Amino acid sequence: MTEMRPVQRPDMPVRVPLMTKHVGIWGSLQASRRNILSIIPELATRQPMVSGKTGKRWHMVMEPDALRRMLLEKLDDYPKSIVTKNLLRPAIGESLFIAEGAHWRWQRRTAAPVFSHRNVMNLAPVMSGAAERSVARIHEAGPRAVDFLQEMVSTTFDVISDVTFSGDEAFDRDLVHRAIDAYISEAGKISLFDMLGFPDWVPRPGRMFSAGGMKDMKRVADEAIEARAARGAEGVPDLLDLLLSGEDPESKRKMNVGELRDNLLTFIVAGHETTALTLAWSLYLLAFDPAIQDRARAEVNEVVTDGVATGGDVENLGFIRQIVDEALRLYPPAGMVSRTAQAADTLCGREIRPGDTVIVPIYALHRHHLLWEEPDAFRPDRWAEGKPDRYAYLPFGDGPRICIGASFALQEAVIILATLIANFRFKPVKGRDPEPVMILTLRPEGGVWLEAEPV
């Protein structure tokens, strides 16, 4: 690994300082405890592949054809690492995110119809309602600066809890929210050992699981699922209703309470955190570039009526979608993922051996100089100039295991961002720039503090 180079151009949004000089395993471990993305060599933004050995062989892959091979053509040969699974299993069990092979396939077939375009559109009013409540809270905060990371976490949790357990008094939202926050902050302290695929019995400094919180969260979810199954659906079906009625079209298998709970908690854990980050980073970028913010507001004013965006508005908010796409490029929530090779292979002309750790540094891929023009710049217009190679842009992964909720997340982000832009002008707070730090996800350390001036 290499030493960090803390360079930040004032005309560019904040970025992670990558490494330029070898510092050895101890230096890499120290850097990774602070920010796992800081172990990425700067060279990874200019070369198709970087390999090394830090206890065991590892490879970072940034070449789209090689990524297509890993994520599509040879999917079963590159499963998620055992350590990644062990990290997440206490919260989400053997759900879609963790399961492999046949167990993953039947769950995916069962859940896929839940996220059809029709069902996602039916849930749009929930997103609009949460956006409207966010506007009210920001107004109430008065003229002082607001941490939009925390505000967006609250807003997206509002959405995901409504679309999973709508109207269920048995579902203790505050308890679940606290348990998830504790889990992310403690269990999410990924060490270099994790990313390089060391065996799980190797001690991890600082590794803790909030076992009590997880147990309570699962109990609350189980009780809500059982109550809903006994009561039946009412009104517009939410995600729980849709999963309760779903079955695998091939085996006719239906999910039991434990499987329903693990998948619903997966949607809650992944669904609100990642969209909240996308929105927080989008707002930071709009405050960073007032001209782009003005263009975005002009589009919103033409499309949105009464200051609240709807599902029907989304297709006409093309520039807002470009801003979201660009925020996901610059600050992908999953900034780095790892796989453990199961079979001998060749990537970019380089030998891959069984047991090698193969890392996809999505953060470096999205800022690669061979794939993107001005890769560190905030340029939403690049998305109107032509789509990049499909495997050069992986905010939701790709191949058969692409994020099942991608369309839901994008619709939610556009509705909420458009609503906020319709109501406020955002300005940065001097000296409070966020720092991109990846723990479990790529978060703006210190929050996203902005002044929100009513328009």
Image (cartoon, grey):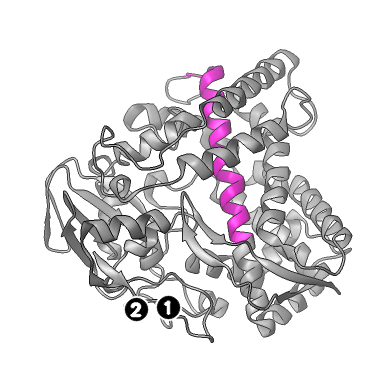
By secondary structure, the bulk of the magenta-drawn segment is best described as helix
Does residue 247 appear to the left or right of 50 in the view shown? right
Question: Is 140 colored magenta in this rendering?
Answer: no
Residue receiving disc 1: 375
Q: Nearer the viewer, residue 2 or 339?
A: 2
Residue receiving disc 2: 369
Kind of residue indicated by mark 2: His
Does residue 258 appear to the left or right of 417 in the view shown? left
* Image point (71%, 33%), residue name: 173
Does residue 260 appear to the left or right of 337 in the view shown? right
Q: Is residue 402 above or below residue 210?
A: below
Distance of mark 2 from mark 1, alpha carbons? Answer: 6 Å
Res. 245 in view: no
Which corner quadrant holds the C terminus? bottom right
Judged from the image, the secondary structure of the residue bearing numbered disc 2 is loop
Q: Nearer the viewer, residue 327 or 210?
A: 210
Judged from the image, the secondary structure of the residue bearing numbered disc 1 is loop
- Check if mark 2's residue and mark 1's residue have beta carbons within 8 Å: yes
* Image point (43%, 31%), residue name: 89
* Image point (71%, 16%), residue name: 227
The mark total stands at 2
* Residue stretch in magenta: 252-279
Q: Residues within 10 Å of mark 2 (few under 14, many from 20)?
A: some
* Image point (37%, 64%), residue name: 38
Provide residue 78's location: percent of width, then percent of height. 26, 44
Q: Is residue 216 above or below residue 430?
A: above
Sequence-first tag of 2 and 1: 2
Report which quarter residue 62 is drawn in: bottom left
Kind of residue indicated by mark 1: Pro
